[in-house]
Amino acid sequence: ATVHALLEAVDTLGGIFREFASAQRRAIDAREATERMRGLLLASMSHDLKAPLNAVLGFTELVRRNPLTKEQHESLAIIEQRGRELLVLIDTILDSARVEAGELEVSPEPTQIGDVVMSSVLEARDLSVGSEVQIMGEIQPGIPPLLIDGTRIVQALTAVVMTAARFSDKGIVPVRATLPEEAGRVRIEVETSGEGLPLQEREKIFDAFKSAESARRQGGLGLGLGLARAIVEIHSGSIEVDSTPGGGMVFCVWLPIDNTNQAIRSRASRPAISDLG
């Protein structure tokens, strides 16, 4: 009887292992299917969406070369701006998928933070044409070069600046790059000029499709900020959100001067901040 009971227990255990193996195989198949769908999504969005959108922007530029009325120029400007916004959104979705798959590539090289800040300021200005918000760049002289992928950091910082601009009805959105003493990191602050979010809702704006309702009303789903945080963290940095004395928000992007991939080191003085306007 004891042997019979033991055999039944072994048989039962074998059945459990067979069920586990079957479930594991189904999970592997589902993961492989997800990867195939991801590849199809990337290929489809890269070609089926970006190609015709680029054609629209190209024809917009051709039409602009012809004699047009003021109203027609304004209409073309709107078409071009919205088209560029869609291109940014498509690139954000593509790169977010690459981040999730662990396939986002970065190419670090010594880069001046002033070039990065000004590029993001100019890009954000182009994308926010027509708004009453003024985006200004301020760089503290003497910040040493950082070993970063400048294009990726510009992409991340532009997303942060655009988010701050959405939460600013009017006024100035400053983008300040400083080198705090003894911090060992560069701090880039982007401050809103309008009403911020409650403390319990701030972190949600970094989660794709889980943004707070007030953030959605400002036109954001967390895609850009989520990607921005991923890019900054790849560079061993971080993004924080805090309150301003006026009730707004300030985004703080921290980038290390030295990290495991960087051998650049120099001492920087702290003279007055210069306005790059």
Image (cartoon, rainbow, N blue to C red):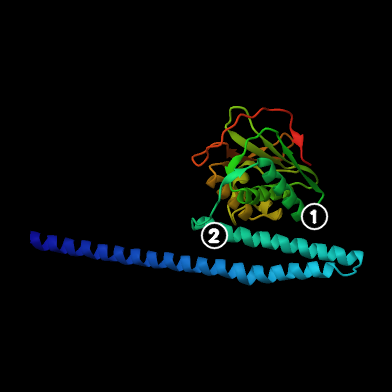
Q: Position of residue 183 (x, y in %)?
A: 58, 30
Q: Residue at x 62, y 72 (%)?
A: 48
Q: Position of residue 35 (x, y in %)?
A: 47, 65
On residue 97, which mark appears?
A: 2
Quadrant the N terminus occupies? bottom left
Left or right of residue 235, residue 158 in this image: right
User: What amino acid does circle 2 point to?
Assistant: Ala
Q: Position of residue 211 (x, y in %)?
A: 62, 52
Label 1 residue SS: loop
Quadrant the C terminus occupies? top right
Q: Residue at x 62, y 39 (%)?
A: 145
Give the distance between the C-alpha atoms of the residues marked 2 and 1, in whole angstroms. 29 Å
- Residue nearer the viewer, 250 or 113: 113
258 is higher (above) or lower (below) than 210: above
Left or right of residue 217, residue 209 in this image: left
Q: Position of residue 60 (x, y in %)?
A: 79, 68
Q: Earlier in the sequence, mark 2 or mark 1?
A: 2
Check disc 2: other Cα within 10 Å, few if <14, some if 14-19, many if 20+: some
On residue 66, which mark appears?
A: none
9 is higher (above) or lower (below) than 133: below
User: What amino acid does circle 1 point to?
Assistant: Val
Label 2 residue SS: helix
On residue 129, which mark appears?
A: 1
Q: Residue at x 53, y 47 (%)?
A: 234
- Residue nearer the viewer, 120 or 192: 120
